[in-house]
Each structure stands twice: as C-alpha cells, then as structure tokens.
Image (cartoon, coloured by chain):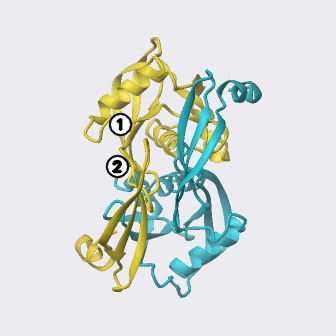
Chain colours: A cyan, B yellow
Amino acid sequence: MKIDREHELQTLREVQTSSKTVFDGVLLHVKQDTVNLPNSGSGIREVIRHIGAVCVIPVTQDNQVIVERQYRYPLDQVITEIPAGKLDSREEDRLSAIQRELREETGYTADEWIPLGDFYSAPAYSDERISMYMARKLHAGDRHLDEDEFLDVMTVPLTELVEQVMTGEITDAKTQTAILKAARILGL
Amino acid sequence: MKIDREHELQTLREVQTSSKTVFDGVLLHVKQDTVNLPNSGSGIREVIRHIGAVCVIPVTQDNQVIVERQYRYPLDQVITEIPAGKLDSREEDRLSAIQRELREETGYTADEWIPLGDFYSAPAYSDERISMYMARKLHAGDRHLDEDEFLDVMTVPLTELVEQVMTGEITDAKTQTAILKAARILGL
C-alpha cells in the first residue's frame, strides 16, 4: 500500500474560511466552521473539540480482564467497558492519566504498560483521540471514585469478552478494539 | 459473567430532570440536560444526538479489502477508513443504507452481507450507533460520489491492514474494529 501523502493532502484537503463557537459546555465544545472544498465549492463542518481521553485493558496473569459496568446516559443503558477517562488538560501525560484512572476506578495498579495505539472515536466530526494501553502485572488495591462517579467492577476471562465482542453483546467502541487487540497479542 | 440487569439499572441509572437543545446543526444536535444521580446528587450531561450510521468491510475472494483514503477536517489529516455513511433518517433500513453507501463511494456491490454487530462511538456523550457489516462476493462497478464528497479508493490485503491496526497506523475507531473482527472470522 503506497500512498503519496503530499499529493492526497493537496487534492483532498478542506481549507477553513470561518469558525464560530456554537456551544461551549463543560465537556463538549462545538464549532461550526465553513470550508473551501477541493472542487472550489464550499461546505459547513460541525466539529466537537474534545480534550482527549485514555483507556486501558487490564489483564491478569491468568488472562482475566478487569471491566466496568457503567450507566451511559445517552443510551439509557448500563454497558460493559474497560477503564477509561478524560484527560485533565490537553497537555497531561497520557500514561500518567490512565494510571490514575485505573487506580481510582478499580483500585488496581500495574507494573507493565503496553501501548496499543491511538483511536479516533468519530473522525468525521470530533477530534477526540483516545490513547489505548494494555496493563499487565496487576496489583489489587482500594478504589477511590469521584463523588459523581458510579460503576461496578468485575473480572471476566478475556476469551469470554472476545465472544461478547464477536456476538455484538459488547457495543462500546474502544472496548471492542482493546479486547480484540489484546486477544491477538496474547494469542487467544 | 452473571449480571443482574434490573438491579444494576436501579442502582446506577441517572434520571433526567431537564433538557435543553443548545445547538441544532445540520449534522450535530447537542443537548444539555440535568440529571439526578444515584446518590441523589445532581449532574449535567452534554449529549450529541446523532441520526446513526453504517459501515462495511468489503473483502474480496482473495482477502483484499476495499478501503478509502479520506480527508477528515477535525484532524486535518487524510486517513484510511472502511466505507461508511450516515443514515438518511433514523428509520432507514441499515442494510439498505450501507449497500447504497458502498455502491456510491466505491462502485462495488456484494452478494453476501454478514452483520458484525453494533458499535457505539462515544457512549459517554453521544448516541451514535454504527451498524457494521462484512461484504463478500463483491462485484466492481462505477462509483457515484455526492458532489461534496472527495475520497480515494484502494485495495489492500487484509493481513496488511491488521498489521496497520496493531502498529497504530490505522487510527479510525470503526475501521480498527471491523478489520480485527473480519480477520478473526476469516482466521487471518
């Protein structure tokens, strides 16, 4: 797969001609921009600016995974997810951020952190970038949830989670990818 | 993994107390709601209401995948993605929608459509649900892009795409999952 990156950026790039903040919330910052299209037409782009996030699949020595059952308001459902959280600032070190989130949400710390790459949740309209890790050599401890955070922690065999991804029972995007990546790395 | 769904919904659910539309755009519809939390505190939830989407990983008889190189304005990058598109309406049949998108964007039609499950892009703040398929028994044809749509189509071996997912070179969420699911199903 050979790609001429300079040429494709030249032929496909959209150039901003105006930008307006249409919503400036606590979590979400929404912009409505106008752009010049490659064919010299113009278009509107509605974009979420997101601070960024991190997630981790914590896998024990015997290939059990620490997962969370968490209520998600937009879906009105409790779903299975791996531990994850927003950055405190755009500049925050991503590895430190996920180490903090794992400890707070599950009590676990880990001696080994394996980067699984980055993940753009919805590149058509959001710049949210989630950095993904696998954690090994886990140590259990006490969890310290934020006072407005509610979730249950459970331990599930990785092979069972792979099944749930393949049948469609696990629906969270980052959780699907992290499980399949970890299973591939561990030969499961 | 045994889950008492009724009990966890009772203990984790958030109950809406007010809802306000803060942005009503062409693509994005943003609400800022207030909710009662499980501990009887209250919170703010900022939520994208999205019409829904579909995507497909089209795999030829010799395990080549039809992918797209598409400019994504929020990232200012051209990235590799599988064919995908928004629904025309919330009620639109999802299989018909992805058959249309595949034909328009790549020219391909397919005789076999295998559902790969649903995918919530960002369940913390969006209800976007992407239905994912694998298409087999492909037939090439002419593509018909929307006049404001610009993308390049290429054919890449599935094994090469798996490599790019594992090294982090492919960053699009749905594309990562679809490639890993297809590889697992095809034993690659």
Q: Residues within 10 Å of mark 2 (few under 14, many from 20)?
A: some
The type of residue carrying mark 2 is Thr
Q: Give me the chain letter of mark 2.
A: A
Frontmost residue, B40 versus B84: B40
Q: Secondary structure at mark 1?
A: loop
Q: Residue at x 26, y 73 (%)?
A: B4
Q: Residue at x 52, y 65 (%)?
A: A27
Report whether A48 appears left or right of A168. right
- Residue at image mark 1: B87
- Residue B148, given in percent of the width and then of the height, sits at 52, 25
Q: Is residue B15 left or right of residue B176?
A: left
Amino acid at circle 1: Leu
Above or below, A143 against A46 in this view is below
The image shows residue A131 at horizontal and vertical percentages of: 63, 58
Residue with the mark numbered 2: A167
Tell me the residue at 66%/31% (across/down): A13
Report x, y in % for residue B123.
42, 59
Depth check, mark 1 against mark 2: the one in front is 1
Classify 10 Å Cα crowding around label 1: few (below 14), some (14-19), many (20 and above).
Answer: many
Residue at x 49% of width, y 67% of height: A65
- Which corner quadrant of the image does residue B31 belong to? bottom left
Quick one: SS at disc 2? helix
